[in-house]
Image (tube, coloured by chain):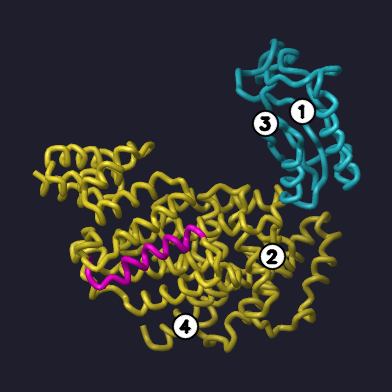
Amino acid sequence: MDYMLLIHSDENYPTPAYGDPGFDEMMAGWLAFNQKLIDGGHWISAANLQPTTTATVVSKTWGSAPTITDGPYAETKEQLGGFYLFSAADLDEAIALATELPLPAGSIEIRPVSFRPDAA
Amino acid sequence: MSDSDSRVANALTSVTREESGRVLALLARRFGDLDLAHDAVQDALAEAVEHWPVDGVPDNPAGWLYTVARNRAIDLVRRAASAERRTLAAAPDILARSEPDEEGDELVVDDAEVGDEHLRLVLLCCHPALDRDTQVALTLRLVGGLTTAEIAAAFLVPEPTLAQRIVRAKRKIRDAGIPLSIPASLDERVDALLTVLYLIFNEGYLSRGAAGLRVDLADEAVRLTGQAVALLPGNAEVEGLLALELLTRARVAARTDGAGELVLLDDQDRSAWNLAEIRRGNAVLATALARMQPGTFQLQALIAAQHSNARTAADTDWPAIAALYRQLESMTASPVVALNRTVAVAMADGPGAGLAMLGSLEGLDGYHLFHAARAELLLRAGRPLEAAASFERALELVVNPAERRHLKRRLAASA
């Protein structure tokens, strides 16, 4: 079964940038997690997103032309910052993997995938 | 109702409550589909209702239920297969896995394998991906074999709401891939199960006698907790919960008077307590304690045992109860437990000691029993005006009608 992990966290929480002290350690955690997904045959895809300040919203309303606006929908404490798409035997395995995500704080929504056009 | 009618009715109730959960658990695993298994068991139960009064109760009702439900499940798979090509490909596989030859028609319902499947189902109902209300409803529906209407009536919610909650839960179990498995984190799941069972028990105990037609949830909880004790051998907390339930239920007949009004522990007619049930609770508790795995349910059972084994209210060992509450408080950090300890301390050392402790409790201003306890202590300390004010505050917060009437009487008496 395929699951998507939607990673929500406070994007204003300071995280080390490339070259900063602690950056290598932080990346090592994520790389190890990725490797674990690959080694376990779980890996499908993943992405880290630019902050919501770079977001653009296309809104479509029935019967009128689409509008294009700046930024996220609303001010929230946590924002969608990235995702993993992976396969797991069942929800318990998906929860176990999500728990191992090297995210210091935030919430991870686990959603089963109902259909994926690129899947065999 | 004739003798044979009532024999059939009893057999139907017993197979529904005692066996249908196990049969469901077994079929859910065999077919890998909880929803299908549940439909099949429901259909088999409907057949029993139709045929048993005419043909008589089969010698092995559980085996009968399993066979009929399994055949029904195979039938449902075949039907779905002819309707849907995608299932067609998988159907021979599923049917092969559930061939009758595997275990024959003679189902030994108590074998270890069934116990294992049964435990998976019980734990599934308490999966953390389901919210607490849903866990409660699913446990009663799937494990306890209660109907949607019975559960809805017991919790005073509209039947469509409850039915929808169960449908949504079954859909989530299927679509999110919640497994029928024994989890690695078994302890956490058992904790959730015990919480669910205790919620069911309390709902039944506190609302006892409120409405004539309601299923007795306290009895259901005792039954399901007894099953959990069998499924989780050697687990002292499960036994602790069973002991707590038995020692509490033993006093239920004395808890309300003829008019349905609440009678406080001190004023209860102790000759109306169920001594056999107290003995059984004591025995279960002794077994649990001998395992040397301390836990909160065993502590609560020890407190209930102090009350239930006191011949008169004056015999109650309040210092011992206060000490047990202190232990419980250190394990739970619960302000409600702290409040109970205060009451026990006041009984042991006088209202002044209790009032001093109450002053240091935080986070209970919205809890009616905090104000009610404070009022009682003020009354005993000879401060009726302040007591009345606290009773009034408690009355603003109370929900349960029997408790409200009790507080009103106490307020009137304090004047």
- Residue B256 picture location, percent across and down: 24, 63
What range is drawn magenta here?
B295-313
Please indicate whether residue B29 sits to the left or right of residue B266 in the image. right
- Residue B234 picture location, percent across and down: 59, 71
Mark 4, mark 1: which one is toward the viewer? 1
Name the amino acid, label 3: Ala
Which chain is disc 1 placed on?
Answer: A
Residue B81 within the magenta-colored segment of the rendering: no
Q: Residue at x 50, y 74 (%)?
A: B287
Q: Give whichever of A88, A119 is nearer the camera.
A: A88
- Residue B278 picture location, percent across and down: 36, 74
Q: Are dots 3 and 1 on a single chain?
A: yes
Dot 1 and dot 2 residues touching (CB under 8 Å): no
Label 4: which residue?
B8
Which quadrant of the view contains residue B191? bottom right
Q: Residues within 10 Å of mark 1 (few under 14, many from 20)?
A: some
Name the amino acid, label 4: Val
Q: Residues within 10 Å of mark 2 (few under 14, many from 20)?
A: many
- Residue B289 picture location, percent across and down: 50, 69
Q: Which mark is residue B28?
A: 2
Colour representing chain B? yellow
Q: Secondary structure at mark 2?
A: helix
Label 3: which residue?
A105
Q: Which mark is residue A56?
A: none
Which chain is disc 4 placed on?
Answer: B
Label 1: which residue?
A82
